[in-house]
Structures are given as C-alpha cells and as structure tokens.
Image: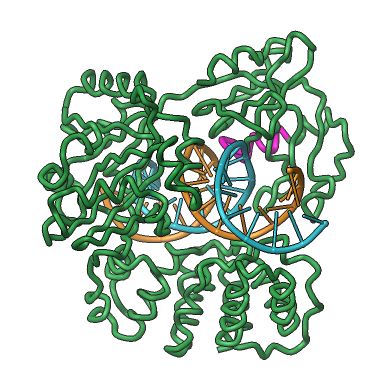
Chain colours: A green, B cyan, C orange
DNA sequence: TTCCGACAGTGGGGTCGCAAT
DNA sequence: ATTGCGACCCCACTATCGGAA
C-alpha cells in the first residue's frame, strides 16, 4: 500500500466531523491493506509509530527538501526508513539522522509530507486516535469492538491487536490474555469537586484511598524476575531498585500489582512531585540516589495474585486479594464507608499529611483498564488566586484566530509591577475566547498582527496589565523559568473579575506563602 | 427528545539524557 | 560548561458525537 493512500484517508477523516463517517473511512482503508502492512497502517492512522519514538520532533523537521510530484512511497519503505532513523539515536550522529529524514521527505509528495510531519510531531489532528480506530478495526474485521478493547487492554498495542483482528477475527482476539511481564493499560480516574459528590457518583458504600503525588507503577513478578512499568507502559525497572526489592520480598511469586511510587522525607511527609519525578527519571547514579532520595511504594490494586487473573473481579475482591499478597505497610491507606462525613474527614486528614487528595472507588467495578470509567473518581483540594493577564498567545487548531494562552502575573506592591507565575489556556469556553480576544486587542502593547500562520511570528501579544482573572490551581512549585522562582501547577481560568483593579490582585507574598 | 459517556484537541511546568555549540 | 531538543512524568478543561434513557 502507498503512503498517499493513508494521507488521503487521513484527509477524508479530518474533513468529516461525524465519528461514524471517520470510522467508515478508516475501515474502508483497513479492508484494503495487506497483512504485512496492517500494523503500519493502523499505527500511522491512529497517530503512533510502530517504533514508538524515533528521536525526531518539530525542530528536526525544519529545512526539509522540496516534495515530489508523483507518489510512489510504500508503507514498507517509509517504515524501513523510520527504523533506520531510530537506529541512529544515541550514536552521536545527528547529521546522519537529518540525512535520512531528508531522504524520506524528498521521496514523497506535498500531501504525504504534511501527513508525515503531523505524524512525527504527534499532532495528527484528524479527530481520530485510538478510540475511533478501535471502532474502525471492529468494523473492518467484523468483530465486536468490546473484543478489540479487551485485547488492547491486555496487549497494550493497538497495531498488534488490530492486525490480529484483521487476520484471525474474534478467535485470534480471544487468544490475548494477561501475561506477567507484559504491561496492561492502567485504569484511570475521573474527577469530582468534592468527596461527597464523588461518593454520590460511585455509589455508597465506596472505598476512599489516599491519592499520592508520585509516579504510577505497575509491578510484575514471575519467579525471581520483576519488571516495573509506568502509565505509558515504559519499562523503568532499573530506575526503581527499592520497588524491585519490595516486590521480591513478598511471599507470592506470580504477581501483577498496581500502585504509586514516591519519595518520602524522613518524617514521612511526601517530597514535592518534582523530587519524586526527578528521582524516577534518573537512569544514572541510581545506587547513590537511593541513599539521598529513597523511594517508597504503595500498592492499591492487584491484577494477578497466585496465578489467578483478577481484572474482571469487582474492586472489593481484588483488594481482598491484594491484602493477602502484600503487607499492610505497602498498601495505600483506604477506608470503606457509606458515610460522607467520615469520607470527608479521611480526605482532610490525607491533605493535612501533605498528600494530593483521595480517590473514591466504586466497590463493584472490575479493572476497566485504559478507560476513564466512573469506577474511580479523584478529589483534590483547589486553590484560587486573582491574577493579572500580562500577555496572550494566538491559539492553534480550532483556537486559531483567538487569543488563547494567558500569561499570568501576581502584583508586587514594592515595585508596583507584576511577576509572571505561568500560563494557562484551560477553562475557556468559545464565548469567553471570543470576548477576551476582543478585549485583549484593545489593550495590546505589542503589534498584534492577527493570527500568524506560523507560531513564533507575532505569537505573543503583550498587554497593558489591566484585566484581573480568577485562576484555580493545584499548588505552587519551584521554578527556574520564572523570575519569582515560583510557578502554578495545573492553572485554569474560573472567571474574569471586572470588579477588581490590577493593584487589587493577589500579591507575590500571598503566592509565596502557599509554596511548601 | 434530552441526557450523558467517551473522545479528541489544546495546551501547561518540570526533569532527565544526549548532542551540538 | 551551557543550551536546545526529545521524551516522559504529572495534568484540566471544553466541544462534539452518538448511544442511552
């Protein structure tokens, strides 16, 4: 199959807003692809690469050669070139990779170049990724989409699962099973504004567990072999020796456990996320790092204990199995209750101890891997501040033509100026985007040449600091990027405060007081 | 007919490792 | 030694479609 076939299908998918139409386009193409190129086609059209990453991003894709007129590149040829490019990573030869990228882009037409560019930068923007592709595979292979989903959960790779479905139908999909040593797509949580609201959603009684601010881990043990995976199924076994030892210390030898790893201070309070994140990401000097920044693991779910797969069991039974396999000290603190007051108190205690919040879990739900089901609902406390809009950036995609991303500042009474604390684009409705774009253009201090086609060109519009906006955020963290040494975590817009003047905005001192 | 679950898109800060400067 | 880039850790929120109620 030719790459141009995929580029055309992608364009058709993007052109139709209806999901059913997108599914038809994708299924039609999957019906034509040969078995040896099915994985490549599925990967590309769901915005992935079979190589996963190849060390190429937006910067490597500048100064590309002129396109060809005639499309001749096959999927196999493109895949082979990407494989060679990946093979160059870590060899110190950026020049060789650029040469290969040039070969690739010089061998395809303009439409294919555009498709490849978006694929390699992870911005396919055709309104279809995994979710739509699952339906398309189900249609093309004439199997129930639930079977595709189930297989994907257990295998973690849609191209592999899709190719199996196209090849052998339901029979081959049913052959996928939980394999110790192969990561399962982790179950995700929805969120709610309060514990009471979460309890209502989950149905009482429910379990309430501490939400720890660390890195999600899935630990597999088979005999004396242990493997640890992250949320995106990356293998980090070598970076977390404490966790490996903890799992080897358990009596069971056939285990798959779900949990969170984090750095604790000697007094038991959690380190800031930045500390945990840096420790987990470090691949060098782990032996000495574990002395200075030791990691602790807390498990909250069990997918396999003693040779039995537990994914389809209700939460309560999985947790009972977890308690048989893991000592209490390694299990995330948990309370089962139907009493909202008791649950709120548990939440308050967790937050006072420095943790992120709680997760409320419905007792009856199976491990719905890879989906954000209503089985788990996270609740976190929310801070708010009134800040001043210092600048705005032109949006992209569906936000093109709107000033979208806000630069936020706190008031500094000593200088009469404002100190930038970060940016946000979240919480804005189309109506608010329209309103703020109009307002911003009136107070623009730098040339606002309209939505520049290419980012970076008149991208940021400086504003006279007059507008106050109420911002919600999860916390304040240390920052080397911003002049105040602080940045907001997960900032989002709640509403504008036309009743407030900029000098009435929250001050730098107020923000500093929130920082741990 | 209305409601609501699931998805995709639009970007945020921080950290590490590597290659180029 | 410093800087830029790619990848990945954490992520919130809105609009939209289409099946459920």
> Observer-nearest residue: A430 or A360?
A360
Identify the image quadrant of residue A88: bottom right
* Side of A476 where A246 appears, left or right: left
Task: Report the quarter where the N terminus of chain A lies.
Answer: bottom right
Confirm whether the magenta stretch covers residue A431. yes
Residue A118 screen position, x and y as percent: 64, 66
> Observer-nearest residue: A464 or A441?
A464
> Observer-nearest residue: A254 or A495?
A254
Residue A500 screen position, x and y as percent: 68, 13
* Side of A448 where A424 appears, left or right: left
Q: Residue at x 29, y 82 (%)?
A: A169
Identify the image quadrant of residue A307: bottom left
Residue B3 screen position, x and y as percent: 36, 41
The answer to whether residue A49 of the structure is visible from this angle is yes
Confirm whether the magenta stretch covers residue A90. no
Vertical side of A495 occupied by A230: above or below: below
* Side of A300 where B20 appears, left or right: right
Q: Residue at x 11, y 57 (%)?
A: A306
Vertical side of B3 occupied by A63: above or below: below
The answer to whether residue A119 of the structure is visible from this angle is no
Q: Residue at x 33, y 25 (%)?
A: A268
Q: Residue at x 38, y 80 (%)?
A: A163
**Number of numbered discs overlaid on the protein picture:** 0
Residue A424 screen position, x and y as percent: 63, 35
> Observer-nearest residue: A385 or A226?
A226
Vertical side of A500 occupied by A222: above or below: below
The residue range painted magenta reads A425-436
């Amino acid at each position: 199959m030719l790459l141009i076939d995929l580029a055309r299908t992608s364009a058709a998918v993007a052109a139709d807003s209806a999901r059913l139409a997108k599914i038809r386009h994708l299924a039609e193409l999957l019906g034509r692809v040969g078995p040896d190129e099915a994985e490549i086609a599925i990967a590309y059209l769901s915005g992935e690469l079979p190589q996963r990453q190849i060390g190429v991003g937006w910067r490597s894709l500048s100064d590309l050669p002129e396109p060809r007129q005639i499309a001749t590149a096959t999927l196999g040829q493109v895949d082979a070139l990407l494989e060679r490019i990946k093979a160059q990573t870590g060899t110190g030869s950026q020049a060789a990779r650029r040469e290969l990228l040039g070969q690739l882009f010089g061998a395809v037409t303009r439409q294919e170049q555009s498709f490849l560019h978006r694929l390699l930068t992870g911005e396919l923007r055709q309104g279809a990724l995994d979710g739509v592709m699952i339906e398309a595979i189900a249609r093309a292979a004439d199997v129930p989409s639930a079977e595709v989903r189930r297989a994907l959960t257990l295998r973690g790779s849609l191209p592999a699962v899709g190719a199996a479905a196209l090849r052998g139908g339901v029979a081959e999909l049913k052959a996928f099973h939980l394999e110790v040593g192969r990561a399962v797509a982790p179950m995700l949580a929805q969120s709610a504004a309060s514990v009471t609201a979460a309890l209502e959603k989950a149905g009482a009684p429910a379990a309430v567990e501490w939400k720890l601010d660390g890195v999600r881990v899935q630990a597999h043990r088979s005999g004396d072999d242990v493997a640890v995976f992250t949320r995106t199924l990356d293998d980090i076994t070598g970076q977390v020796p404490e966790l490996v030892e903890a799992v080897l210390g358990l009596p069971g030898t056939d285990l798959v456990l779900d949990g969170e790893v984090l750095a604790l201070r000697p007094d038991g309070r959690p380190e800031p996320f930045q500390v945990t994140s840096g420790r987990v990401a470090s691949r060098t000097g782990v032996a000495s790092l574990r002395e200075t920044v030791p990691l602790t693991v807390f498990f909250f779910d069990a997918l396999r204990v003693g040779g039995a797969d537990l994914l389809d069991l209700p939460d309560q039974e999985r947790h009972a199995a977890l308690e048989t396999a893991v000592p209490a000290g390694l299990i995330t603190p948990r309370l089962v209750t139907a009493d909202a007051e008791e649950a709120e108190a548990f939440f308050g205690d967790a937050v006072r101890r420095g943790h992120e919040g709680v997760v409320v879990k419905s007792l009856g739900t199976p491990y719905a891997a890879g989906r954000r089901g209503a089985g788990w609902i996270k609740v976190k406390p929310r801070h708010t501040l009134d800040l001043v809009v210092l600048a705005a950036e032109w949006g992209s995609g569906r936000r093109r033509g709107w000033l979208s991303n806000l630069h936020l500042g706190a008031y500094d009474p000593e200088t009469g100026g404002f100190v930038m604390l970060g940016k946000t684009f979240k919480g804005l409705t189309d109506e608010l985007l329209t309103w703020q774009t109009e307002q911003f253009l009136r107070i623009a201090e730098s040339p606002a040449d309209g939505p520049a086609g290419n980012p970076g060109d008149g991208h940021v519009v400086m504003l006279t600091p007059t507008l106050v906006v109420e911002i919600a955020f999860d916390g304040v963290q240390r920052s080397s990027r911003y002049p105040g040494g602080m940045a907001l975590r997960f900032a989002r817009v709640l509403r504008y405060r036309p009743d407030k003047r900029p000098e009435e905005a929250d001050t730098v001192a107020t923000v500093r007081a929130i920082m741990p």
